[in-house]
Image (cartoon, rainbow, N blue to C red):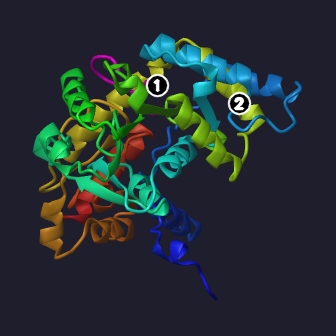
Amino acid sequence: MHLSPLVTSLVEPATLLMARRSRELKAQGRDIIDLSLGEPDHYPPAFALAAAHEALNGPWHKYPPVNGHLDVRQAIARKFKRDNGLEYTADQIVVSTGAKQSLINVVMALVGPGDEVVIPAPYWVTYSEQVRLAGGTPVIVTSTLEENWKPPVERIAAAITPRTRLLMFSSPCNPSGSVLTLEEMEALAAVVRKHPELYVVSDEIYEHIVFSGTHRSFAALPGMMERTVTVNGLSKAFALTGWRMGYIGAPLWIAQAATKIQGQFTSGANSIAQRVALACVEADPAQLGGMRADFLRRRDLLIEALKTVPGWRCNVPQGAFYVLPDASASLRKLGLKTSQDLCMHLLEHAGVGVVEGDAFGATGTVRISYATSDDKLLAAVDRIAQALV
């Protein structure tokens, strides 16, 4: 068998690896609590499912335009104006099969061999691999728990070189749940302004899951609209992970380039899912308040419970539905080398699936998703504590 160098160079995403391993053990009859995937356990909103049912009887069964149906892109543009203060035209919107495809479209459109992409850590595991797929070099800027998992802007600025093409980040952040403040974003924008060839990918998929204050889009800062690609989708806030629906708002030339890339991979995104997207972006975001309240309660429940795990240290994340505790004390106690080793130990001896923080650029940590029930969270922490005694 002969595989391409591209395939052999790729690493399986740590989140998917742990989810797969958890499923395998469940299939063997093991009692596994899987906290590896960022997948809300909530049911999708009624208006989303109603839109899907209605679309089945409508004229939505043919190939869609590559960048999405016009009325859907117009609705997304209105959503950007309403929620984010961003003025996009429909031609600046590209609808894709999930925000992950939105991201790779942009990376492949802007990054090539010799280019560098600055990625503040911790970061979503796929960012770095997508950069490598495009032939670029990821430049990781690390942070610590004491810094609330947010690298100081000076450290980010020092990583930028004449070869830097993109800056990629998410706020709220996966895996840390950290949220950039307005002051932090303004400081970052001041750095971007000094580099005319530098563009920003702002991943805002968790925008509706912010626990204090309000979400702010990076592109809304002065001078950043023409320098920023804003990425979003339906998976998290609308609990529609399986529908695979993402989108971007971008400068026209980048949107056109992303459309060109997408045209060679999937063409247009699923037509029925696009009708669901239209209903979601037109809905009042206030309808998502119940889900956000659930996540806030679970965050507090989990952080309090984790105090029983010997040596683990946590901050208090302000968004998304993850905690990223420093578990390095357990590595030392058990004589393990990496957080992946620790995750495999917990899966085997505690029956709990969590994800290694090393893959997110946060050495010695584990990512725990609290997008599940209170009972499962408490039972999982109890098992972890017992396995680490």
SS class of the residue under badge 1?
helix
First in residue order: circle 2 vs circle 1: 2
Q: Position of residue 157 (x, y in %)?
A: 18, 42
Q: Position of residue 343 (x, y in %)?
A: 33, 65
Looking at the rendering, in which quadrant would you find the C terminus? bottom left
Horizontally, is 150 left or right of 51 in the view? left
* Type of amino acid under label 2: Gln
Q: Image quadrant of residue 168?
A: top left
Q: What mark, if any, has residue 274 been given in the picture?
A: 2
At horizontal 59% and vertical 81% (from top left) the residue drawn is: 3
Q: Position of residue 354 (x, y in %)?
A: 37, 57
Horizontally, is 121 left or right of 246 in the view? left
SS class of the residue under badge 2?
helix
**Residue 46 visible in image:** no
* Type of amino acid under label 1: Met
Looking at the rendering, in which quadrant would you find the N terminus? bottom right
**Residue 143 visible in image:** yes
Q: Position of residue 313 (x, y in %)?
A: 14, 48
For the residue pair 123 and 186, the one nearer the viewer reads as 186
Q: Residues within 10 Å of mark 1 (few under 14, many from 20)?
A: some
Residue extent of the magenta highlight: 205-215
Label 1 belongs to which residue? 291
Vertical relation: 63 (above or below) 84 = below
